[in-house]
Amino acid sequence: EDQVTQSPEALRLQEGESSSLNCSYTVSGLRGLFWYRQDPGKGPEFLFTLYSAGEEKEKERLKATLTKKESFLHITAPKPEDSATYLCAVQSGYGGATNKLIFGTGTLLAVQP
Amino acid sequence: NAGVTQTPKFRVLKTGQSMTLLCAQDMNHEYMYWYRQDPGMGLRLIHYSVGEGTTAKGEVPDGYNVSRLKKQNFLLGLESAAPSQTSVYFCASSPAQGRRNQPQHFGDGTRLSIL
């Protein structure tokens, strides 16, 4: 069964204190791994897509990496505005013509000034 | 620059009442999805559509119905609301599946409480 596990559930950082969020997955043929950011009262906002092991994507203070079993979202010198819930989702190769995603439960990140 | 728009944003229902949630997208996407988000559960797929006039069941379809009469709209119906359907409902859309799939784009949700 396809499964996504994110850790930690919550993370509190001081401004400027770099860290990483983890997304472990079990999927039958990975077609894509997606990172989203979700602010309170809002819908998930797309950040990155990773398709194959070894791939990396960067955007401002965020960098996403992918191995065959997990993905990391590295946050370098975070700022308070980076505070949000970060969601990871995977698409299985056996999902058919649907683009269906399996989501993890997210990591709630709080960055204190 | 609207993207995915959901209406209403908030709603309170009594057990047994019915209602329809509306999702509209202006990106000409083929695929549309309805999810629910509950604390500690993550986003779970209710129903989805791969094109106008087509719908299919997701992970948690019981108690819900959907319709996609127009490409840009995807409706989610609750025929007889139950307290277990208290949740935040998100609609998403994406282009059709390709060799490298494009991400889904989400609306800002409908917060539904069933008393």
Image (spheres, coloured by chain):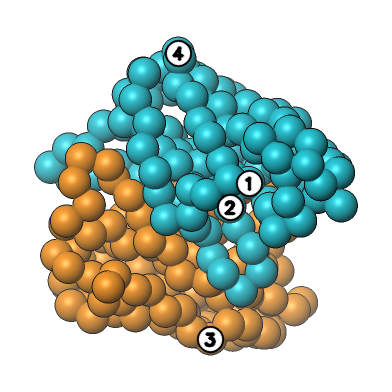
Chain colours: A orange, B cyan
Dot 3 falls on a residue whose secondary structure is loop
Rounded to the nearest angstrom, the CA distance separating label 3 from label 2 is: 22 Å
Of the numbered discs in the image, which one, if any, rests on residue B36?
2
Write down the chain letter for disc 3. A
Rounded to the nearest angstrom, the CA distance separating label 2 from label 1 is: 4 Å
Determine the residue positioned at 20% across, 40% down.
A97
Contact check, label 2 and label 1, Cβ < 8 Å: yes
Disc 3: which residue: A8
Determine the residue positioned at 49% across, 74% down.
A75
Contact check, label 3 and label 1, Cβ < 8 Å: no
Dot 1 falls on a residue whose secondary structure is strand
Tell me the kind of residue under disc 3.
Answer: Pro
Disc 1: which residue: B89
Tell me the kind of residue under disc 2.
Answer: Arg
Disc 4: which residue: B70
Q: Earlier in the sequence, mark 4 or mark 1?
A: 4
Dot 4 falls on a residue whose secondary structure is loop
Judged by depth in the image, the label closer to the viewer, 4 or 3, is 4
A83 vs B7: above or below: below
Judged by depth in the image, the label closer to the viewer, 3 or 2, is 2
Rounded to the nearest angstrom, the CA distance separating label 4 from label 2 is: 22 Å
A98 vs A38: above or below: above
Tell me the kind of residue under disc 1.
Answer: Tyr
A105 vs B22: above or below: below
In the picture, which quadrant includes the C terminus of chain A? bottom right
Tell me the kind of residue under disc 4.
Answer: Lys
